[in-house]
Amino acid sequence: MEFARWRADTLLGVLIVGFPAGPWATNCYVVSTGEGQECIVIDPGKDAASGVADVIAERNLKPVAVVLSHGHLDHMWSVVPVCETSGIPAYIHPGDRKLLADPMSGISGETKLAFQSMTGGHMEFKEPDDVRELADQSTLSLAGLDFTVDHTPGHTPGSVTFRIPEGDDYPQIMFSGDLLFAGSIGRTDLPGGDMNEMVDSLARVVLPLADTTAVLPGHGETTTIGKERASNPYLRQVADEVSGGLRGPTKGL
């Protein structure tokens, strides 16, 4: 399998295989402690199911869960087939759970047109058979790893990030979903978006993190908190407490 942007990397003891999937190039991640071990799948968007299957086969992995950073179509399109193939649960924050069965309620008119073009407007969505709800500041222990869940509304009401704590020989790792990108932040102009909540989430969850924290976003390249603190114009505005003047970006679905 060829990874257009990401490679199969053992990130200082944690095996993370990521690839951009579908027309929105949503980063899907398969995370494990190593080959031949259990794994979780983060954000299987459109056209991600085959890529996930390839990674699992090539790395001899056993999926135990799908976890979703939020409920937008580009991050959950393939959640049902991935869950059904392996008989595993899906985790999502209750604020976005309704989007599993009704993703159209959370997208823009432009995306609805794209959806109709791709599917003829006839595709139906449903929840996976086993859905489990995420809670703020909870610890999700899966596949031999502990993930801290942070509720980060702003892009959507139920957006979350997942953090693997720092180890003896590796930094903290953050899967930021559509909260934080390299050079930008998530858009807030979609249904359920809220710029004030986005600013609060960035200030509360992102700014306190160590500069060495690795950030694996929902779209685009990997980065670090230190790099974004120094160069991301939106994060710098939040740090300078000028949130009232922030102009919302347009990255994400």
Image (tube, helix red, strand yellow):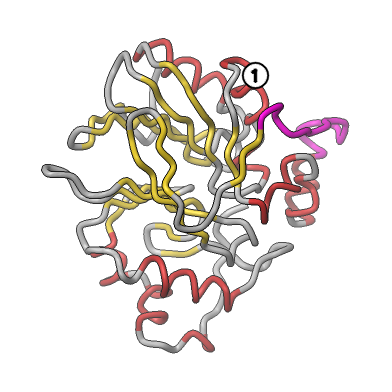
* Residue count near mark 1 (Cα–Cα under 10 Å), binned few <14, some 14–19, many ≥20: few
Q: Which residue is drawn at 30% across and 26% down?
A: 8
For the image, the number of numbered tags is: 1
Against 126, is 181 above or below?
below
Q: Residue at x 20, y 49 (%)?
A: 171
Residue 129 on the magenta segment: yes
Seen in the image, is 160 located left or right of residue 79?
Answer: left
Seen in the image, is 231 located left or right of residue 185?
Answer: left
- In the picture, the quarter occupied by the N terminus is top left
Q: Residue at the far left: name it.
A: 169
**Residue 2: % across, % down:** 39, 21
Mainly helix, strand or loop, the magenta region? loop
| Front one among 3 and 143 | 143
Seen in the image, is 209 located left or right of residue 23?
Answer: left
**Residue 12: % across, % down:** 18, 37
**Residue 114: % across, % down:** 75, 43
Q: Which amino acid does label 1 sit on?
A: Glu
Against 117, is 96 above or below?
below
Give the SS element for disc 1: helix
Numbered range of the magenta stretch? 116-130
| Front one among 114 and 139 | 139
What is the quadrant of residue 182 in the picture? bottom left
Residue 90 on the magenta segment: no
Q: Which residue is drawn at 54% across and 32% down?
A: 66
**Residue 175: % across, % down:** 40, 48
Instruction: Name the residue that disc number 1 marks.
Output: 84
Against 31, is 229 above or below?
below
